[in-house]
Image (tube, rainbow, N blue to C red):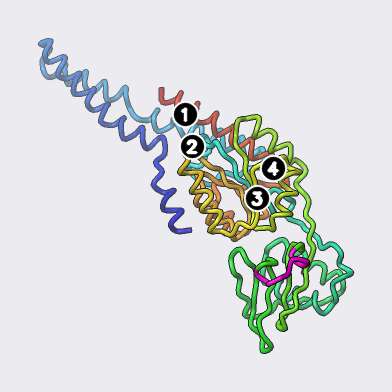
């Protein structure tokens, strides 16, 4: 996170770049005016008066307002469409975007998954898994806790739970280690690895939990709009490849990658950056925060983890993804207007 944010911090805003040129140019113009009138034999007093007039006429007030005036209008327009802009230079960076990368769970999908085939999971296994899941805000964890509560179980969060980024949750008990997370991390065999998430008890017995999550209502429409606008679209998810492939197919995304731990997401964003792409990352989980900081610009849903919302340049309100296309369109329009104002 720290490294990614420092890298982005070197980005200089358009107004700052213009101001560095504007001030010396204006003073040079004033000096040239003074010298010119002196060479015409007008004397130092009339020459100085003309030079001062040049400095007054070229007062930087217009320059100071060129970007803020546009930014206020653009921010208001985005706010009316359910998008809160946070970063001062976020609009400028968004105007340069040519590639959009989505996370899956909670971003491309509703983030409200439910357990399927719940009748196959014994109560005692469910309650132990739920006690681990209660320590996490991940949508799959919430689905397990919700199912336990539906069965009338009193879910007490387990103590000493450790979260391993991209893998899951674990804790050490007197009988051994319990784990809740990816099938690979829990040591599931091929027959169990089809589950969205697995629980391994202290004795090493693995139980698969099949979780279903649906796409946001306008996900496919938003992807089609982005593609029509000339943007490349990718899907990066830490979920199992089968689930990611299904979501990508339904949303109309051909370039997707599953089983992406946080470091792999960052590596992919670095690959795109090295190829000259300017990436907009959209994610909601704790594990997405480093990727959000690494990307050229970033968005996060209002339902996202606190650290993701803090890292993102803008927050999407509501359950619609239409704000993604709106943000990019308004950002490009605002950039054109800012340049026009400078002119």
Contact (CB < 8 A) between labels 3 and 1?
Answer: no
Q: CA distance from mark 3 to mark 1?
A: 28 Å
- Helix, strand or loop for disc 2: helix
- Helix, strand or loop for disc 1: helix
Q: CA distance from mark 4 to mark 2?
A: 21 Å
Q: Which mark is residue 92?
A: 2
Q: CA distance from mark 2 to mark 1?
A: 10 Å
Mark earlier in primary sequence (2, 1):
2
Image x and y of residue 2, in percent? 45, 58
Q: CA distance from mark 1 to mark 4?
A: 26 Å
Mark earlier in primary sequence (1, 4):
4
Q: Which residue is mark 4?
A: 321
Q: Which mark is residue 301?
A: 3
Question: Which image quarter holds the C terminus?
Answer: top left
Q: Is residue 190 magenta?
A: yes
Contact (CB < 8 A) between labels 2 and 1?
Answer: yes
Image x and y of residue 335, in percent? 49, 30
Q: Which residues are magenta?
A: 185-193
Mark earlier in primary sequence (4, 2):
2
Indicate which label's residue lies in the foreground, 3 or 1. Answer: 3
Q: CA distance from mark 2 to mark 3?
A: 20 Å
Circle 3 packing at 10 Å, graded few (<14), some (14-19), many (20+), is: many
Task: Please name the residue shown 80% across and 63% down the image.
Answer: 210
Residue lying furthest top: 40
Task: Please name the residue shown 50% across and 40% down the image.
Answer: 278
Task: Please name the residue shown 58% across and 56% down the image.
Answer: 288
Left or right of residue 53: residue 333: right
Image x and y of residue 285, in percent? 63, 58
Which image quarter: residue 241?
Answer: bottom right
Contact (CB < 8 A) between labels 2 and 3?
Answer: no
């Amino acid at each position: 996170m720290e490294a990614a944010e420092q890298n982005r911090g070197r980005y200089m805003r358009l107004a700052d770049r213009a101001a560095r040129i504007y001030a010396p140019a204006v003073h040079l113009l004033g000096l040239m005016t003074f010298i010119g009138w002196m060479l015409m034999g007008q004397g130092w007093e009339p020459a100085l008066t003309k030079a001062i007039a040049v400095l007054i006429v070229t007062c930087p007030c217009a320059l100071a307002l060129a970007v803020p005036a546009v930014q206020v209008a653009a921010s208001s327009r985005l706010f009316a469409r359910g998008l809160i802009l946070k970063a001062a230079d976020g609009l400028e960076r968004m105007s340069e975007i040519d590639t959009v990368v989505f996370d899956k769970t909670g971003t491309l999908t509703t983030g409200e998954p439910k357990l399927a085939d719940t009748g196959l999971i014994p109560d005692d296994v469910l309650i132990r898994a739920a006690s681990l899941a209660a320590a996490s805000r991940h949508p799959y964890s919430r689905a397990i806790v919700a199912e336990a509560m539906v069965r009338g179980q009193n879910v007490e969060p387990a103590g000493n739970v450790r979260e391993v980024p991209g893998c899951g949750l674990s804790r050490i008990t007197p009988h051994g280690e319990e784990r809740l997370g990816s099938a690979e991390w829990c040591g599931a065999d091929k027959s169990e690895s089809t589950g969205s998430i697995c629980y391994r008890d202290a004795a090493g017995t693995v139980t698969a939990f099949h979780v279903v999550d649906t796409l946001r209502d306008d996900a496919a429409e938003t992807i089609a709009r982005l593609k029509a606008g000339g943007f490349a679209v990718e899907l990066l998810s830490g979920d199992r490849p089968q689930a990611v492939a299904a979501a990508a197919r339904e949303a109309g995304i051909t370039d997707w990658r599953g089983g992406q731990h946080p470091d792999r997401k960052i590596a992919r964003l670095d690959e795109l950056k090295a190829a000259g792409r300017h990436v907009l990352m959209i994610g909601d989980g704790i594990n997405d925060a480093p990727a959000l900081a690494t990307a050229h610009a970033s968005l996060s849903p209002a339902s996202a983890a606190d650290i993701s919302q803090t890292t993102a340049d803008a927050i999407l309100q509501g359950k619609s993804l239409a704000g993604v296309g709106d943000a990019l369109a308004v950002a490009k329009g605002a950039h054109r207007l800012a340049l026009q104002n400078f002119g």
